[in-house]
Image (tube, grey):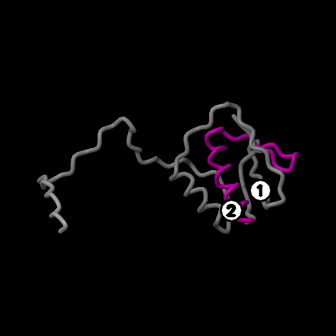
Amino acid sequence: MGKLVYDGRLSIPIDDRALAHLQVVILAKLRRRESFGFTVEVDGRETSVWIGPSAALEFDYADRRRPAINRAWLELLAATAASQDGLVVAPEPPQERAPDPGEAPRRPRGPVVPLRPLPDAA
């Protein structure tokens, strides 16, 4: 379990996988100099903070390995961050299966049309 430290005084425990996704979304918004609200449950209570370019943030991971990123989750979190309610940790949606780099490409369906040589340019 990692944590997001806000302004050096509020430590928010967050699972490393969720924290990695939040970091991508938060840093993207801050690079664009966008401010937004962030609401999360801490110790059974809902806590909201305002995150802007001047906010001091620390992303502290429990594990040294960075989790794989789910693009669908990033898009969902980015959409919540852009909403009037601000960023909330939404459940991770299923990720479309990425092709295995060692997997052979699939053969196209239907008849195979042979390639014809190009005519000689004279």
The spot of residue 91 in percent (x, y) is 56, 48
Residue, x 71% and y 51% (percent of image)? 40
Does the stretch in magenta take in 8?
yes
Q: Please tell me the numbered disc located at residue 118.
A: none
Q: Secondary structure at mark 2?
A: loop
Name the kind of residue labelled 1 in the image: Ser
43 lies left or right of 81: right
Q: State which quarter of the image contains the C terminus.
A: bottom left
Mark 1 or 2 closer to N-term? 1
Q: Which residue is mark 2?
A: 86
Residue, x 59% and y 38% (percent of image)? 67
**Going by the picture, which residue comes out furthest to the right?**
9
Q: Secondary structure at mark 1?
A: strand
The spot of residue 108 in percent (x, y) is 21, 51
Query: What residue span does the magenta drawing correspond to?
Result: 5-33
Residue, x 19% and y 67% (percent of image)? 121
Seen from the viewer's position, the closer of residues 113 and 97 is 113
Q: Which residue is mark 1?
A: 48
The spot of residue 21 in percent (x, y) is 62, 48
Name the kind of residue labelled 2 in the image: Gly
Q: Are marks 1 and 2 in contact (CB under 8 Å)?
A: yes
Is residue 62 positioned above or below 79 on the image?
A: above
Count neighbours of disc 1 (C-alpha within 10 A) and say few if under 14, some if 14 to 19, many if 20 or more: some
